[in-house]
Amino acid sequence: MGQLTVGSNPTPSAETARTLPGVDRVQLDELMGVALDEAREADEHGDVPIGAVVARDTGEVVARRHNQREQDADPTAHAEILALRDAARAAGSWRLDGFALVVTLEPCPMCAGAVVAARLGLVAFGAADPKAGALGSLYNLAADPRLNHEATVVDGVRADECAPLLTAFFADRR
Ligand code: ZN
């Protein structure tokens, strides 16, 4: 379990200060369970098993999706993008500052960019992605004061369950 990483900006904007939902650790673990179930569904159609959930700060799930890049032949059909689209539709707004994204793998630059674009308050992920991760590994787009939004990031949530899903998927393909 990693530490809470709030934006590195020493004088966070008023916007940042009011965009931290009160999702607690127990809720994050439960939400990651839903994301893990989603990830397993991706595997069934040959997609890399990654699952994502968007929840309100009460813990209520408003969207749950999995990676469909292969199935849809769509380079943007990552679990996070699909879940954010569904959540925005449910909320009737592109702005999701009262919501949390919970995803099994550290988001890539595109998805981390979508986190900023949606003004999400909180992102939690399971396994870190040293090759493409943009919430701490290669970049940290959620804590860059040059961008117009910062989000709280929680890493390592149920990572011991998220990482083996991916390892097994790629081992099967070899
Ligand atoms: Zn992505």
Image (cartoon, rainbow, N blue to C red):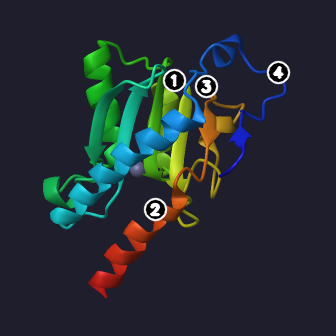
- The kind of residue on which mark 3 rests is His
- Residue where numbered disc 1 is placed: 119
- The secondary structure type at the circle numbered 3 is loop
Q: In x, y percent, where is residue 38? A: 28, 50
> How far is disc 3 from disc 2 in space, using C-alphas?
30 Å
Do the numbered discs 4 and 1 sit on residues whose CB atoms are within 8 Å? Answer: no
Q: Along the horizontal axis of the image, is 130 left or right of 94?
A: right
Pick whichever of labels 2 and 4 is earlier in the sequence. 4
* Image height of 156 relative to 56, above or below: below
- The kind of residue on which mark 4 rests is Thr
- The secondary structure type at the circle numbered 4 is loop
Pick whichever of labels 3 and 2 is earlier in the sequence. 3
Residue drawn where x is 66% and y is 19% of the image: 16
Residue drawn where x is 28% and y is 82% of the image: 173
Query: Observer-nearest residue: 166 or 136?
Result: 166
* Residues packed near mark 2 inside 10 Å, few (<14), some (14 to 19) or many (20 plus): some
> How far is disc 4 from disc 1 in space, using C-alphas?
18 Å
- Residue where numbered disc 2 is placed: 161
- The secondary structure type at the circle numbered 2 is helix
- The kind of residue on which mark 1 rests is Arg
Pick whichever of labels 1 and 3 is earlier in the sequence. 1
Q: Nearer the viewer, mark 3 or mark 2?
A: 2
Q: Farthest bottom residue?
A: 174
Do the numbered discs 1 and 3 sit on residues whose CB atoms are within 8 Å? Answer: yes
Pick whichever of labels 4 and 3 is earlier in the sequence. 4
- Residue where numbered disc 3 is placed: 149
Pick whichever of labels 2 and 1 is earlier in the sequence. 1
* Residues packed near mark 4 inside 10 Å, few (<14), some (14 to 19) or many (20 plus): few
Query: Observer-nearest residue: 165 or 86?
Result: 165
The circle on residue 79 is none
Q: Nearer the viewer, mark 2 or mark 4?
A: 2
Q: Is residue 157 visible?
A: yes
